[in-house]
Image (cartoon, helix red, strand yellow):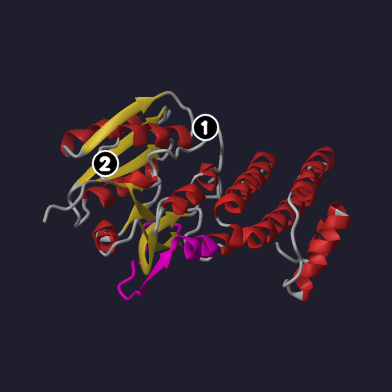
Amino acid sequence: MKLPLISVIVPIYKVEPYFNKCISSIVNQTYTNLEIILVDDGSPDQCPQMCDAWAEKDARIRVIHQKNQGSGTARNIGLDAAKGEVIAFVDSDDYIAPDMYMHLSTLLEQGADIAECNYIEVTADDAVFGQKYETCFYTTQEAMKEHIHDRIFRQLIWNKVYRRKLIENVRFPNGKKIDDEFFTYKVLGNAKVLAHSSKICYAYRQQMDSIMHVISETNRLQAVEAKVQRHAYIKENFPMLENLSAKDLWFTCIYQGQMALRKSSPDTVKIVMTYLEKVLLENSVDTRGCGIKEKLWLVLAENNMHATCRVRNILGIGL
């Protein structure tokens, strides 16, 4: 039986030291029916030339050069160009296990619409990929619950493969630093069966200037904005999870308020707190069923967000 074509989309910007390791790990997959789409997002280093050099060596590689527009737009360009029945993403400073796509494709063969593996955070080319693992299958609502809890099926896009039909009408927002937060929940919601494998197949390279580590006012407010949009989506499509989603949104607001107090100027803190208070006012939460500590912080936040965040910072809670 012919294996389905997997389109692997790789947005590229200023990753010259890590680029060859990343592309080599994709090219050398045991799953060979790949379309590898390299989207050069106007990278100012040698990455554009390196992309072209790789394309000359492997006919499965397609290169798209564009002016710098951000990772979300680069991924959208890749999605529009993709021909595969299955879609995957890799960040260009990361690398993957040789059998990642072979492993995940077996889960698709067993009926999954989305299959994800585990990942490891690394600082060098020294990842130890897993051999022993367990696999579980989930319904859409079960997976969405895990997503809200941030346990598995997290917002991360690169440790998953997706049947193309799930993404036909979903795209990344342009101009957002944390674009995956606006994307993943919609694709999860389109799936009927989702598979999670505990096998470590993806190496996420920790860098202090990466989106996941840079704390800024923009990232803070976008993180809350993404949760607000996700909460509206869950209210409409998964009403049984509405209050769980609301509680997660409230604690996201509290956390981002804490970060603003620690990192931002007084004027910026005032702007952030005003926005967060507006979000809480527009998105109610039912504290019945919450634990005592959770209920305490939610009630305090409802009455005085600024003071709640300050007290939690003093106590070292949630940092």
In the picture, the quarter occupied by the N terminus is bottom left
Tell me which segment is drawn in magenta. 122-146
Instruction: Give the number of the disc on residue 174.
Output: 1
Which of discs 2 and 1 lies nearer the camera? The answer is: 1
Task: Say if the magenta span includes residue 269.
Answer: no
Q: Which mark is residue 127?
A: none
Residue drawn at 72 percent across, 56 percent down:
250
Binning the other alpha carbons within 10 Å of mark 1 as few (below 14), some (14 to 19) or many (20 upward) gives some
Gap between marks 2 and 1 measured at Cα: 22 Å
Q: Mark 2 — residue?
A: 36
Q: Is label 1 in a helix, a strand or a loop?
A: loop
Residue 212 locus on image (x, y percent): 55, 50
Residue 271: image quadrant is top right
The x, y position of residue 255, in whole percent, is: 72, 56
Which element is circle 2 on? strand
Q: Amino acid at mark 2?
A: Ile
Left or right, residue 51 beside residue 285: left
**Horizontal side of residue 86 vs 45, given as left or right:** left
Most foreground residue, 125 or 11: 11
Q: In the image shown, does 289 or 76 lie closer to the viewer? A: 289
